Amino acid sequence: MTPCCSNSALSQRLPARMSIRSVKAFALVCASLIALAGCASVPLPTLPVETPAAWRQQARATGARAPDLRGWWKAFEDPQLDRLVDAALADNLTIRQAALRIDASRALAGTANAAFQPQLSAHTFSEPAPDSSASYFQMGFDARWELGLFGRAQSRARVTAGDLGIAESDLQSARVSVIAEVVRSYIEFRGARLRLALFEQVAATANEKSTLVATRQRLRLASARELALTQAEAATAEAALVEPRLAIDNARRRIGVLLARSEDAAGFIDDDAPMRGRSEDIDSVGVDSMPADLLRTRPEIHRAENEVLKTAGELGLARADLYPRLGLGGALTYASKVIGHTRLSDADGIITFGPAIEIPLFDWGARRAIVTARDAELSASLLAYRQAVLEGVAEAQTALTTLERQRERLAALQRARESLERSDVSSETLHRLGLADSIELATSRSTLLQARIEIVQAQQQCDIAFVALYKALGGAPLPDTTMANRDARTDAHGE
């Protein structure tokens, strides 16, 4: 049976009209609290910026073509690498986890200030009379609206905006790392294939040389010692084939994991495709960005910035808890007495409405301790931001210096290879003229092949340094949802 209430009964339970004096007193209290509310807001601290005006290594960067930070790996001009990167961005599990965390943060950010909006709830309960002769049944609606004064609403918005910004920074950091690892693994895969081809030529040359020495030894033109040395050289060349083969398997397996596949990446890497030569444009690519641009592109710095925003909001909430909570409350309640467990008496209703004020008085210093703790955390987050900036600049500068030194090493090895190529041409000429035997020609070719292997290794290290540089710069395409909440964070930063 649903309790009901007649208009006459309801009117008898309505509160009497508030007096003019009570209204003025209430208005005066509200005005005083609102005036004090502005004093409790925590201003956002100024973020320290400690970046040099320019990179120290600028020689190669001046006048050079700089690839887009959002697609820097395309400088290698390798369609297979482009497909691998696209697949990793779509399927990598770390990236997908970070994207789901953004969805979770965005869902909470959408209700950041729900606590400061009007709330409505319903309730029912029954309670026996002290003499157990009857019970009371009550139902009704409660309404409450807490005003987000003393910086509570703004601080809550900062906390949720900071959480969302941290999640977005983690997603971008994952994209930067995954792209860099895919490109690095592919470079190692490609370099290992090139080395394997050269090592096979070295092994073939060593076996040919060993056969020639064995023939000469049978003719008493070479000693047993010379034969043993050439046989050892051939065996060493065969053993050297293990390293590039293992590197190929490991790189393929790493790419498979990055592409979220339990097996290796054989389905994505075409082993039969001709190996594209290393793009010479890599050597002419420079960096035209300034160190201060890291504040815009490096996700670790973005994360530290959002940590400052979040801790500032938590400090604001802790300080707001030192002040009263002011709101409005009301209720519509119906009550009925159950007589003899079988019959309800007439239901009576009552409406209540008025201010809801909660004033903290004494808590043994608990709230003050929370304020002190949050203040220390804000100071720590500022230091963490400063550290993130310094580490970002140092990592980028180190990567830039390493790339320049690797380029210098590669150039020196290329000059050495050119000299050996001229020497090999001379050896072939002498061999045709009968002035040099086949063993000397094989030795010359083996030396040239070793120089070419060193060139491939140096090229690989140079390319890996190139990858490390753009990883340090935060190079990766931005996800579609990265800037979706820029306006919300802007509002959270505002005073």
Image (cartoon, rainbow, N blue to C red):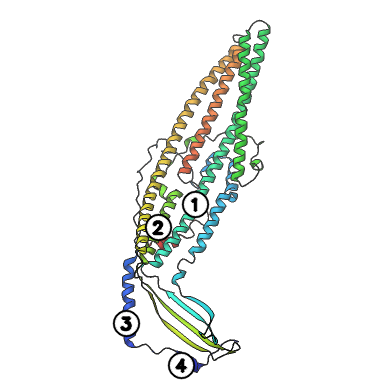
Q: For the residues marked 3 and 2, what is the alpha-carbon distance in whole angstroms?
A: 37 Å
Task: Name the element at disc 2.
Answer: helix
Residue 181: percent from left, percent from top: 54, 42
Label 4 crowd (10 A; few <14 / some 14-19 / many >=20): few
Task: Name the element at disc 4.
Answer: helix
Of marks 3 and 4, the one in the foreground: 4
Q: For the residues marked 3 and 4, what is the alpha-carbon distance in whole angstroms?
A: 26 Å
Residue 152: percent from left, percent from top: 39, 67
Give the answer, above or below, for where 27 lies relative to 434.
below
Residue 345: percent from left, percent from top: 55, 91
| Residue linked to disc 3 | 25
Name the N-terminal-most of marks 3 and 2. 3
| Residue linked to disc 2 | 311
Label 3 crowd (10 A; few <14 / some 14-19 / many >=20): few
Of marks 2 and 4, the one in the foreground: 4
- Viewer-nearest residue: 377 or 462: 377
User: What amino acid does circle 4 point to?
Assistant: Gln
User: What amino acid does circle 1 point to?
Assistant: Asp
Task: Name the element at disc 1.
Answer: helix
Give the answer, above or below, for where 199 lies relative to 394.
above
Q: Does the CB distance between marks 1 and 3 fall below 8 Å? A: no
Label 1 crowd (10 A; few <14 / some 14-19 / many >=20): many
Name the N-terminal-most of marks 1 and 3. 3
Label 2 crowd (10 A; few <14 / some 14-19 / many >=20): many
Q: Which mark is residue 12?
A: 4
Name the N-terminal-most of marks 1 and 2. 1
